[in-house]
Image (cartoon, rainbow, N blue to C red):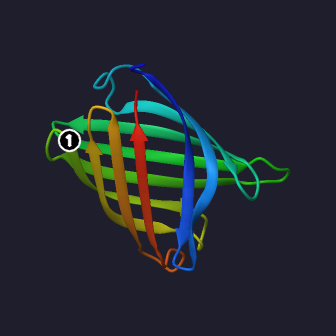
Amino acid sequence: NDHWMTSLYGVFAGSNTKSYQYDQTKLQTRYRFGEAGNFWLDPAVYFEYKIPVKGDAALEFKQILSKDFGSVNFTTNLIFERKMKEGAVIEQGYSLALSNLASETLRIGLEAKGTINGDKSTLFIGPSFSLLTSGLKVISTLGFGMNEASKTINLRNIFAWEF
């Protein structure tokens, strides 16, 4: 509905050293509190259960704060993830995004995301593009590693069909 969303999706992963293959299944749910504009920053919460092909399942929580300024949107996520095994620690991360609705169906922006892990913290910054039609969503972000812990390029593509 307008405030609650849930989805099931598959993740394919790869790198320049291995080909893309099915990596994990995710079940997510997100809840938005109130209507857009009711708060100084519009709050939402997000939970995700990850079931990898290899390794341990994990539970992820995000606190989402977002605000629209006309066609411009600012969104931030505080991210906490814990593997579902004895003695696992909570991993922390974040993302910040600023985007502009360039047309009825195209949103263009800049995104920064990373992990908080002392001197092993990562930081990726790069452009984002979203194509939003009546049912199809295509979202792409390209993050360039900005420190020693994030030497690579991080590419994320999401294809979704909402009904």
Q: Mark 1 falls on what kind of element?
A: loop
Q: What residue do we see at 53% from left, 41% from top? A: 62
Q: Is residue 7 left or right of residue 25?
A: left
Q: Position of residue 122 (x, y in %)?
A: 52, 68
Establish if 8 lies above or below 34. Answer: below
Q: What residue do we see at 54% from left, 76% from top? A: 149
Residue type at tag 1: Thr
Pick out the residue farthest to the right: 86
Q: Position of residue 33 (x, y in %)?
A: 43, 23
Q: What residue do we see at 73% from left, 48% from top? A: 57
Q: Nearer the viewer, residue 9 or 146?
A: 9
Q: Is residue 125 left or right of residue 91?
A: left
Q: Is residue 41 left or right of residue 156?
A: left
Q: Nearer the viewer, residue 107 or 75?
A: 107
Q: How many marks?
A: 1
For label 1, the crowd category at 10 Å Cα-Cα, with few meaning under 14, some 14 to 19 and many 20 or more, is: few
Assign the C terminus to one quadrant of the image: top left
Establish if 13 lies above or below 30. Answer: below
Quadrant hosting residue 37? top left
Assign the N terminus to one quadrant of the image: top left
Q: Position of residue 103 (x, y in %)?
A: 14, 43
Establish if 98 lies above or below 155. Answer: above
Q: What residue do we see at 30% from left, 25% from top? A: 36
What residue does disc 1 label? 105
Quadrant hosting residue 72? top left
Q: Position of residue 157 (x, y in %)?
A: 41, 56
